[in-house]
Image (tube, grey):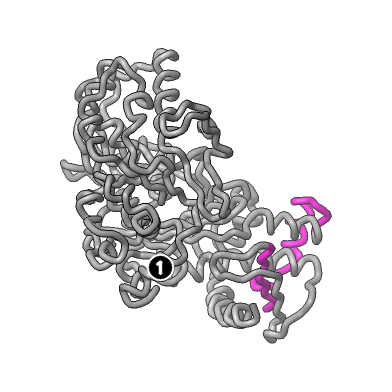
């Protein structure tokens, strides 16, 4: 990944250098990335592939992904520039003056609290907004970023001919025309009605004027947008028949890369823990997100992120298991599923869901306790984390049914003892997937699916020859008799923790 590039800018006489790919502004809340950084990165990538003798002529289709919630503001006349790219010039030279807003707001930005409050108020409250768009208002979501630009830089907004997400922006570069926003990435904007797959006029009106025209018409995520631009045929040797399939966001692309089936849940156990769900009957709440499914337009995906993941598990390992995973496993095995009723909440940093910080321990009688024995502490942190995942997944419409699989990835997915607790809490078998970059792999799968979707071929049929996930562990027989009641108790105790914090 190319993060930091120094390049000359026509809008400033000096050179700009990003740190970690971003500019953090003086208020510490506004975070942007120069649009030309992404353009230059694509230049570098394609030139390196050409130098390495990559045969672009063999490509039948391509798709891609971009970080969710970032937005790009094309200046009036930019579409003509897209349609008339000269193969004698690099992309960043061609588009040097094509953007009304030079720095794209990205997912790290948290400067739009006022705009979020206004959007929620305009539609009848945060739950009503979630019912429409799949999420309550979030500062990083595109609708609120657009509202801020319109309010604070109205002239830049007026000069904007088209607004793209990062995904549809890069697709536009390949297409040589403005590319449609796909349903899945579009549902992460607080602007799309996830049930009709159309922009919500109520939300559009709350954010900025003439917004529907600036966004274009969203399309299914498997859509063929058209052939690749002649620019790439002439400059890099692409096949002129190569089709550009709609690009999507990184989280939807990861769902495609992990090849979830209906009823599955994927759990990424990393520095932060994330759960991806395939659901048919969405139930948006004030926590977590519901997006349109990137591989099946009639279905949905839900995403829940938990900040306290591996670092929290490692802290308990260090303090209760002599800094050893072997000792951690031994301590876990000294206790039984359900931990004899002992239950804990471990939030070393402010959690997202719920918005709570601190360590909170409860005995079997729901009394607060200051500490647990080592073995109890070890099991409590793992059970608490897994119970939270199932509880919030079910709030969003997920159901554990016969045939449900849990797909585990991330660093902790190599720990069989942690996976055993995961299997028991969900009462479902856990499979592991060997995918270094599920988002990129998902784009390759989607590029192939896009060629065949028009004939009715499903995504599952398209990727059926790919290596299957490996069964890691099955749940203990009748274990739901333990964790079923414990799940309800977890939610009741969480209310106490929320009230105290």
Image quarter where the C terminus lies is bottom right
Task: Tell me where the magenta segment starts and ends, as one range.
Answer: 321-348
Q: Is residue 332 magenta?
A: yes
Residue 219 pos. (x, y %): 22, 49
Q: Is residue 35 above or below residue 359?
A: above
Question: Is 165 placed above or below 97 here?
Answer: below
Residues 395 and 69: in front is 69
Count of picture labels? 1
Asked whether, in this view, residue 312 is left or right of residue 55, the answer is: right
Q: Is residue 30 above or below residue 341?
A: above
Instruction: Please say whether residue 208 is one of the residues in the magenta stretch.
Output: no
The quarter holding residue 35 reads top left
Q: Nearer the viewer, residue 178 or 500?
A: 178
Residue at the (31%, 62%) spot, across then down: 207
Q: Position of residue 390 (x, y in %)?
A: 51, 67
Residue 377 located left or right of residue 284: right
Q: Residue furthest left?
A: 455
Residue at image mark 1: 136
Q: Quadrant of residue 82?
A: top left
Tell me what residue is drawn at x 72 percent, y 81 percent. 363
Q: Is residue 430 visible?
A: no
> Visible in this render: residue 81?
yes
Say which residue appears at 53% left-offset and 34% top-offset. Answer: 3
- Between residues 19 and 367, which one lies in front from this camera angle? 19
Where residue 487 sits: x, y (%)?
55, 75
For label 1, the SS is loop
Judge from the rendering whether residue 315 lies leftward or rightward of residue 403; answer left or right: right
Residue at 32% across, 64% down: 133
Nearer the observer, 434 or 240: 240
């Amino acid at each position: 990944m190319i993060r930091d590039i120094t390049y000359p800018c026509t809008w400033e006489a000096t050179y700009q250098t990003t740190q970690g790919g971003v500019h953090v502004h003086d208020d510490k809340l506004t975070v942007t990335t120069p649009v030309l950084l992404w353009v230059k990165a694509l230049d570098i990538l394609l030139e390196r592939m050409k130098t390495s003798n990559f045969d672009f002529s063999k490509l039948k289709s391509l798709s891609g992904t971009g970080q969710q919630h970032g937005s790009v503001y094309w200046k009036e006349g930019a579409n003509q520039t897209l349609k008339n790219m000269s193969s004698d010039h690099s992309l960043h030279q061609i588009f040097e003056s094509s953007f009304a807003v030079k720095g794209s707001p990205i997912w790290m930005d948290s400067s739009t609290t006022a705009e979020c409050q206004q959007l929620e108020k305009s539609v009848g409250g945060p739950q009503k907004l979630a019912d429409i768009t799949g999420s309550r208002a979030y500062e990083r979501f595109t609708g609120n970023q657009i509202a801020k630009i319109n309010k604070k830089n109205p002239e830049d907004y007026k000069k904007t001919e088209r607004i793209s997400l990062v995904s549809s922006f890069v697709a536009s570069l390949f297409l040589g025309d403005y590319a449609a926003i796909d349903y899945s990435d579009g549902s992460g904007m607080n602007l799309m009605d996830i049930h009709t797959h159309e922009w919500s006029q109520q939300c559009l009106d709350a954010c900025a004027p003439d917004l529907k025209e600036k966004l274009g018409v969203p399309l299914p995520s498997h859509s063929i947008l058209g052939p690749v631009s002649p620019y790439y045929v002439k400059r890099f040797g692409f096949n002129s028949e190569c089709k550009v399939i709609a690009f999507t966001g990184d989280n939807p692309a990861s769902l495609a890369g992990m090849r979830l089936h209906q009823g599955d849940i994927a759990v990424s156990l990393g520095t932060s823990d994330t759960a991806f769900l395939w659901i048919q009957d969405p139930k948006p709440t004030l926590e977590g997100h519901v997006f349109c499914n990137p591989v099946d337009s009639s279905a949905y995906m839900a995403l829940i992120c938990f900040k306290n993941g591996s670092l929290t598990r490692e802290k308990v390992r260090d303090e209760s298991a002599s800094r050893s995973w072997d000792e951690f496993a031994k301590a876990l095995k000294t206790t039984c599923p359900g931990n004899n009723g002992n239950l804990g909440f471990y939030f070393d940093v402010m959690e997202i869901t719920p918005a709570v910080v601190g360590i909170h321990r409860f005995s079997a009688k729901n009394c607060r306790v200051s500490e647990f024995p080592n073995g109890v502490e070890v099991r409590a942190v793992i059970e608490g984390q897994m119970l939270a995942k199932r509880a919030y997944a079910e709030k969003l419409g997920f159901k554990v049914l016969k045939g449900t699989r849990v797909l585990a990835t991330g660093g902790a997915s190599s720990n069989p003892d942690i996976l055993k607790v995961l299997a028991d809490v969900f009462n479902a078998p856990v499979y592991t997937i060997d995918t270094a970059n599920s988002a990129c792999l998902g784009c390759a799968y989607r590029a192939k699916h896009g060629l065949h979707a028009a004939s009715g071929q499903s995504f599952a049929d398209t990727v059926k020859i790919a290596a299957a996930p490996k069964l890691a562990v099955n749940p203990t027989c009748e274990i739901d008799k333990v964790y079923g009641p414990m799940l309800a108790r977890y939610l009741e105790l969480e209310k106490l923790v929320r009230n105290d914090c």
